[in-house]
Image (cartoon, rainbow, N blue to C red):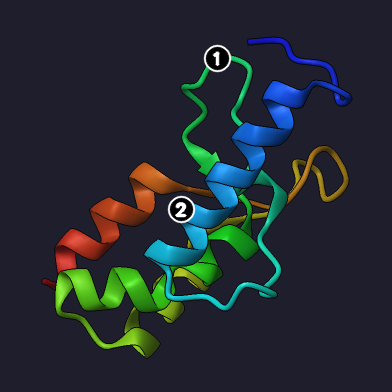
Amino acid sequence: SNLAPTSATLARQVAARAAAFRAANDLTASASIPPDMLTASASGLDPHISPAAARAQVERVAAARGIRAPDVAALVEGQIERPQFGFLGEARVNVLALNLALDQIE
């Protein structure tokens, strides 16, 4: 939905997402959370997350998949797509491509 930055509904949604992300990733209440983990894409179908969001989930993904965290971290770093032409857009990680790479080492 298109909620304004001043929307109380949006504030509640962001707070709930922050709490869920912290709980799922065993983060402290004061831990910083990448903004893309608190909001939704316009379509809800964007396969990309920020490198910071991917890095924040390394420990959880490693534990869930039974893979060493340094191996997951190395895959994350290898999956970072740089901005097009070096300046268009933001660095990003394609979650589908990362999951397929993770499947190859299990």
Q: Is residue 85 left or right of residue 15?
A: right
Residue 60 in view: yes
Q: Which mark is residue 13?
A: none
In the displayed structure, would residue 105 be above or below residue 42? below
Residue wearing tag 2: 20
Q: Could you classify mark 2 by the number of other residues whose Cα lies within 10 Å: few (under 14), some (14-19), or many (20 or more)?
A: some
Please provide percent x and percent y for residue 81. 61, 52
In the displayed structure, would residue 18 be above or below residue 26? above
Residue placed at 68% from the left, 22% from the top? 9
Residue placed at 80% from the left, 43% from the top? 85
**Amino acid at circle 1:** Ser
In the displayed structure, would residue 32 be above or below residue 83? below
Q: Could you classify mark 1 by the number of other residues whose Cα lies within 10 Å: few (under 14), some (14-19), or many (20 or more)?
A: few
Please provide percent x and percent y for residue 34. 68, 57
Please provide percent x and percent y for residue 65. 17, 70
Residue mark closest to the camera, 1 vs 2 = 2
For the image shown, how many numbered marks are present on the structure? 2
> In 3D space, how far apart are the residues under numbered discs 1 and 2 (Cα atoms)?
21 Å
Q: Is residue 38 left or right of residue 96?
A: right
Residue placed at 46% from the left, 53% from the top? 20
Tag 1 secondary structure: loop
The answer to which image quadrant residue 1 occupies is top right
Nearer-the-camera pick, 63 or 47: 63
**Amino acid at circle 2:** Ala
Residue wearing tag 1: 43
Mark nearer the N terminus (1 vs 2): 2
Residue 39 in view: no
In the displayed structure, would residue 27 be above or below residue 90? below
Q: Which of the image's four quarters has the C terminus?
A: bottom left
Q: Determine contact: label 1, label 2, CB under 8 Å.
A: no
Tag 2 secondary structure: helix
